[in-house]
Amino acid sequence: MSHRKPGNTMKVLTDLRQILGEQAVLDSQTLSERAAGIWRQSESLSGIALARPDSTEGVSATLAYCYQHGIPVVTQGGLTGLVHGADTSDDALILSLERMNRIETVQPNQRTLTAQAGVKLETVQLAAAEEGLIFPLDLGARGSATIGGNAATNAGGNRVIRYGMMRDMVLGVEAVLADGTIINALNGLIKNNTGYDLKQLFLGSEGTLGVITRLTLRLFEAPKSRHMAFAATDSFAHVKELLRHMDQHLGGGLSAFETLWSNYYTLVTSPPARSRPPLPQHHAYYVLLESQGADVDRDRVLFESALEAALEQGLITDAAIAQSESECQAFWDIRDDVEQVFVGGHAFVFDISLPIDTMEGYVSAVAERLADTPAQQFWVFGHVGDGNLHLAIQIAEGPSDANQRLIEACVYEPLSGCKGAVSAEHGIGLEKKPWLPISRSPEEIRLMKTLKTALDPKSILNPGKVVDP
Ligand code: ZN
């Protein structure tokens, strides 16, 4: 990779201000007053300048200029990522889509919404709700994360089991290539079988193949009922059986199947966590079940009879059913209180993917390997219905590159034996790049490099992330 360090930062600033307007470009001093990320408030952004175009044409002109001068460009959304996918350097231009924050159309009959990429996820959710529809992607950072960032990282979240990931919810994108070419693939069709699915090149590619500027999203009818329960099981075999059992009985209504290993459940239901345990803390596994449907009374009978049958068949040993919307929310608050893993020490968090039949053996293998490391706590929870576990590992000593590498090896190496993936949701960024070969064959990585070189021949887009050309 050869990035020409721009000889004259002032010239870049002046040129870009001429192209985009004075207010649209922040100098390096001003941009350094911004935090490097939502979770990294003490670190500041760095770059030659920060460009904030308010239109696709502005993004195109910015990229054309950077392409011509060989200036690296890091595109940023809400900065809620977890894998250093939007990290910048002194010689890079930061491209922020924060001023491209308009919802353009909501079409209730077509059930689509078209918006600029800088719109916050929560804003999209609210706009859909006004039409009695939902945009089903949901995650804790909804108030900061942008849909452009969600698309560029193929975000997942808590309802993937029912609606899929971001890749499944985007019908069309408009994206700008490294040289400034605008690709308008903003098609709102559900079925469009006319050759290569170009939008998928940009979804999940973390800003390395193009800059997503606008999206057409798929909306769904809002469910009218929601029923939830915490169920306890005493073996992982029963967790797996329970998943199939609930799916069989709920007729497509199962919308979450979140599993908490015993010690994570205890952590998030004991002080200083705010929640109290809805079930006693001595069980081996806890499953948070959610069913959504169209008829409150009928769905309640269906949900409760499915749970009763699970109890009779011995799949679960206990269950607590949420009696109100606020209790449903309280159940989610238990599952989502991930912050507790950071109380009392530094913790590394992971989002790995693996076949459900390999999960139990995998978790034991990781625990065994951690015994010889500074790890002092190891918690497991996650979207078992999607084959996605989150691991949190707290270490006794302060974080260092050496112990991060050591803990990563304990988590990632056992994945190669079970055909798992080093990332299920968060992406690759810089953090997981060294581990990519665990999940991808040399041939796959070579094809990724071929695509990168074809779309970004000078490698100016988010250089160093995901794969090197
Ligand atoms: Zn997750």
Image (cartoon, helix red, strand yellow):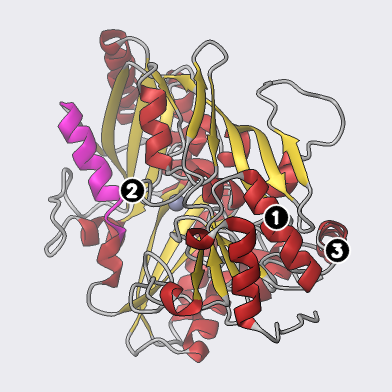
Magenta stretch contains residue 328: yes
Q: Position of residue 79 (x, y in %)?
A: 45, 61
Q: Name the residue type under label 1.
A: Ala
Q: Name the residue type under label 3.
A: Thr
Helix, strand or loop at label 1? It is helix
Mark toward the viewer: 3 or 1: 1
Give the mark nearer the N terminus: 3 vs 1: 1
- Quadrant location of the N terminus? bottom right
Q: Residue 234 carries which label?
A: 2
The reply to whether discs 3 and 1 touch (Cβ–Cβ < 8 Å) is no
Alpha carbon distance from label 2 to label 3: 51 Å
Judging by the rendered image, the residue that carries numbered circle 1 is 61
Alpha carbon distance from label 2 to label 1: 60 Å
- Residue 427 to residue 111: above or below: below
| Nearest to the observer: residue 350 or residue 29 | 29
What segment carries the magenta color? 324-338
Number of residue marks? 3
Q: Label 3: how many residues lie within 10 Å, few (<14), some (14-19) or many (20+)?
A: some
Q: Position of residue 40 (x, y in %)?
A: 38, 72
Q: Where is residue 419 in the image (x, y as percent from the top left)?
A: 69, 58
| Nearest to the observer: residue 171 or residue 247 | 171
